[in-house]
Amino acid sequence: MLMKQISRTRKSSRRRRAWTLIETTLTTIIVGLAVSALVKLVLTSTQTNRYTQRLTIGALLAENCREMMANLPFCDPAEATLNFGPESGETLNGTSPYNDVDDFDGFDSITRPDISSGNPIGPIDASRRVITALDGGVQKVPVEWLNWRQQIAVDPVDANNLNVTLPKTNTARTCVRITVTISYLPPGEVTWQTVTQLRWIKTR
């Protein structure tokens, strides 16, 4: 009788150990899946936050361009509609600054021939100044702005169909479309990625 009871106890003990092993395996699988899902969620959240941050910065840089062009006339007071791009001697914010919207055609914040040697080149604010900060007593473009780019295109369009672009040689133009493109160059990459575009119409 005692031997039978011991045998039953051993069998019961073995059954308990077997169930514990299965439970442990299932628990490990469940915890592993939960951790994997959590890691994926954190990565997705980080990427979303980075994307949203870039969109916000892109919108700010685009609005800077629109604000600095807001009160400019349709065409040059002296040259009328003869020219696209800056007239001779004009610079973004020099002694002869851009004085109409078509002066900004072809503007690119990373290639600024109008900036004197040694001066910082980078994205600009609404007052036409390069965004800089004081670093060791020297005005420099902050690292977080170095990979941002502003480009402006001004194109004459048909006043009756704003989707139709006219030749820039058309001096009878009465309507232009201004397009601001904001791009970002991720660290280690060589291709600029368009973040946002802002378009509006200017009429005579």
Image (cartoon, grey):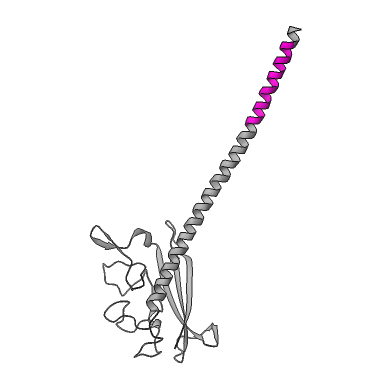
Q: Position of residue 60 (x, y in %)?
A: 42, 67
Residue 5 image-quadrant placement: top right
Q: Position of residue 105 (x, y in %)?
A: 41, 79
Q: Position of residue 194 (x, y in %)?
A: 48, 66
Decide which of 7, 110 is in the foreground and name it: 7
Asked whether the viewer can see residue 99, the reply is yes
In the image: residue 167, left or right of residue 28? left
The number of callouts visible is 0
Asked whether the viewer can see residue 191, the reply is no
What type of secondary structure mainly makes up the magenta span? helix
Q: Residue at x 47, y 73 (%)?
A: 198
Image quadrant in which the N terminus is located: top right
In the image: residue 37, left or right of residue 117? right
In the image: residue 98, left or right of residue 195? left
Image quadrant in which the C terminus is located: bottom left
Decide which of 183, 51 is in the foreground and name it: 51
Q: Position of residue 152 (x, y in %)?
A: 42, 75
Q: Residue reaching furthest left?
A: 137
Q: Residue reaching furthest bottom?
A: 172
139 in magenta: no
Q: Residue at x 44, y 77 (%)?
A: 153
Identify whether 118 is placed above or below 201. Answer: above
Q: Residue at x 39, y 75 (%)?
A: 67
Identify whether 10 is placed above or below 166. Answer: above
Residue 7 image-quadrant placement: top right
Residue 13 image-quadrant placement: top right
Question: Which residues are drawn in magenta?
Answer: 5-24
Decide which of 129, 190 is in the foreground and name it: 129
19 in magenta: yes
